[in-house]
Image (cartoon, rainbow, N blue to C red):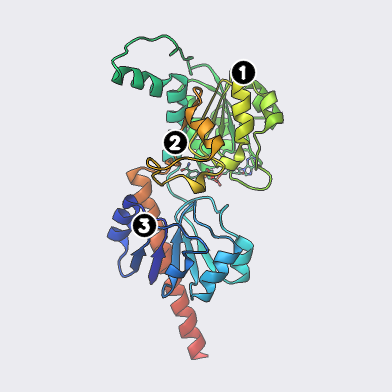
Amino acid sequence: MKIAFFSTADYDRQWFESGKSHHTITFIEQPLTAQTAQLAAGHQAVCAFVHDDLGGSVLRLLKELGVGVIAMRCVGLDNVDQETASELELAVLTVPAYSPYPVAEQAAALLLALNRHLPAANQRVLAGDFTLNGLIGQDIHGKTVGIIGTGRIGRAFARIMLGFGCRILAYDLKPNLALVKAGVRFVRLNTLLEESDIVSLHCPLTPHTEFLINNQTLQSMKPTALLINTGRGKLVDTSAVLDALDQGQLAGYAADVYTRESAWFHRDFTDQPITDEVLNRLRFHPRVLLTAHQGFLTQEALQQIAATLLNQLSFYENSQLRHITRSSMC
Ligand code: NAI
């Protein structure tokens, strides 16, 4: 199968190239947009990522070009217009089962680094300043951690935080029995926000969870609380979070995602102005720690993503062949 692979980074090339078997992959560095969709001409499949545009108009362009399958190398499908995809009979493949540990560990790393001011501490050491004023953190042990969304990643994060000796509160549409047995208490969202010292977001972005953390919900949180977001940027009203930090209603925010990240993340702007004022407020806020959507970025996860997606593409290809053979026999 010929695969047009959009938003290619060097790390993608390594794993997809070594696992591609009989497939032919055209690696394209540009993101998939209405302007670049034409590059998929002559390919049966498109492989895309979180920042690619898979809205209705782009899907229609791809269908006209003869693309039959969209392979998403990520978990969330929030950037895919799934209604239009099914209307056009475009198959959408995803990687539902890659390891949850890299993202759960990224959430834990962000929490620890934010709490102990590690970026600032390292900057001081690099500058030859070995003083400690302003670097005081808190013990994580004994704190109450609120986890919103206890799917695969939320559960892995819960187990990490149980290991730290934390009390865990959780909120999910479907409470998880194994977590309850491990000592996690499922509560209402408001109770979680009111009682937690640390709140971590692990639910998908849906119309129900968009801006789940907003002016109103922030008021329910403790002013000493730390908020961690490795889910999706739009789970949080970023301006409301920045205002809460400035007004002393929240103690810190660490995120791997940002509301308008598709315009910025995974590209190098060191020689260009960054014109997004909210992003600039986040980048330079003393109580914010931001990474550019790298939660999935471990060797194990990259290998699993490539292997799972290429297997699914082979399976799809075989099922299409079986379908054609059956039709020609009838
Ligand atoms: P999952 O599907 O295993 O779990 C999601 C959980 O959220 C489920 O238990 C579901 O019942 C719950 N949920 C759904 N709607 C909810 C709501 N309104 N309120 C509370 N809970 C709700 O998904 P998984 O694998 O744990 O991933 C979670 C999210 O993490 C993904 O949707 C994605 O947005 C994000 N993610 C981020 C990555 C990164 O690199 N930063 C990488 C992979 C995923």
Badge 1 element: loop
Disc nearer the start of the sequence (1/2): 1
| Distance between the alpha carbons at the discs numbered 1 and 3 | 46 Å
Q: Is residue 127 left or right of residue 198?
A: left
Q: Quick check: is the Cβ at mark 1 less than 8 Å away from ligand 1?
A: no
> Does residue 291 sit above or below 141 in this rendering?
below
Q: Tell me where residue 122 appears, x and y as whole percent.
A: 34, 21
Residue 305 picture location, percent across and down: 40, 53
Q: Which element carries disc 2, helix, strand or loop?
A: loop
Which of the image's four quarters has the N terminus? Answer: bottom left
Can residue 185 be seen here? The reply is no
Q: Which residue is mark 1?
A: 248
What amino acid is labelled 1 in the image? Gly
The residue that mark 2 highlights is 291
Mark 3: which amino acid? Answer: Ala
Tell me which label, 2 or 3, sits earlier in the chain. Answer: 2
Q: Is residue 99 left or right of residue 91?
A: left
Residue hosting label 3:
307
Is 203 situated above or below 128?
below
> Residue at the location (55% across, 36% down)?
277
